[in-house]
């Protein structure tokens, strides 16, 4: 391809490798405040966050708490994340240079214990 100056430029393009992110979220909720679509709200918040990340970003474990506690009625939460269900932990996930986080609803498990 020629640039504005008429010089030949070689252009490269790399597609990221999608990395599925798995999560186990266990909630204590106040049943008088927690809405019937509270779990869906949490999953939507997580989806928005994961989709906002770019190649090589870090999936920040502690940031997920703001997304969960932002839903009315959540009184306590335990969150674990991983690249597989076997590697769930309370720690960040550093993506490689050409990796991008991907969201799938079935990869996010949210369990509530209403109080």
Image: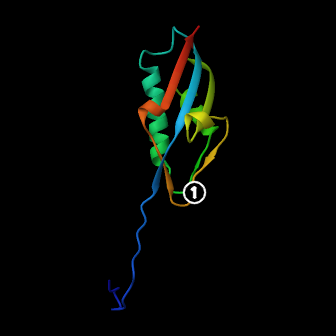
In this rendered view, identify the residue nearer to me: 13 or 63: 13
Compared with residue 68, is residue 60 higher up or lower down, i.e. above or below? below
Compared with residue 31, is residue 111 higher up or lower down, i.e. above or below? below
In this rendered view, identify the residue nearer to me: 36 or 57: 57
Compared with residue 51, is residue 65 higher up or lower down, i.e. above or below? above
Q: Which residue is mark 1?
A: 96
Query: Residue 11: x and y, percent?
Result: 39, 77
The answer to whether one can see residue 55 in this image is yes
Q: Residue at x 49, y 31 (%)?
A: 108
The answer to whether one can see residue 72 in this image is no
Query: Residue 91: x and y, percent?
Result: 67, 40
Residue found at the very far bottom of the displayed protein: 6
Q: Is residue 9 left or right of residue 94?
A: left
Residue found at the very far front of the displayed protein: 86
**What secondary structure is found at the residue carrying circle 1?**
loop
Q: Residue at x 50, y 50 (%)?
A: 53
Query: Residue 9: x and y, percent?
Result: 39, 85
Compared with residue 15, is residue 47 higher up or lower down, i.e. above or below? above
Q: Residue at x 57, y 12 (%)?
A: 113
Mark 1 residue crowding within 10 angstroms, few (<14) / some (14–19) / many (20+): some
Quarter of the image for residue 1 reads bottom left
In this rendered view, identify the residue nearer to me: 3 or 98: 98
Quarter of the image for residue 37 reads top left
In this rendered view, identify the residue nearer to me: 32 or 44: 44
Q: Is residue 6 left or right of residue 58?
A: left
Query: Residue 13: x and y, percent?
Result: 40, 69
């Amino acid at each position: 391809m020629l640039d504005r100056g008429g010089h030949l430029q070689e252009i490269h393009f790399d597609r990221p490798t999608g990395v599925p992110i798995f999560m186990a979220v266990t909630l204590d909720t106040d049943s008088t405040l927690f809405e019937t679509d509270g779990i869906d709200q949490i999953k939507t918040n997580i989806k928005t966050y994961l989709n906002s990340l770019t190649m090589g970003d870090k999936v920040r474990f502690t940031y997920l708490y703001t997304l969960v506690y932002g839903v009315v009625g959540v009184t306590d939460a335990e969150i674990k994340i991983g690249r597989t269900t076997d590697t769930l932990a309370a720690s960040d996930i550093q993506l490689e240079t050409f990796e991008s986080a991907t969201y799938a609803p079935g990869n996010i498990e949210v369990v509530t214990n209403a109080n």
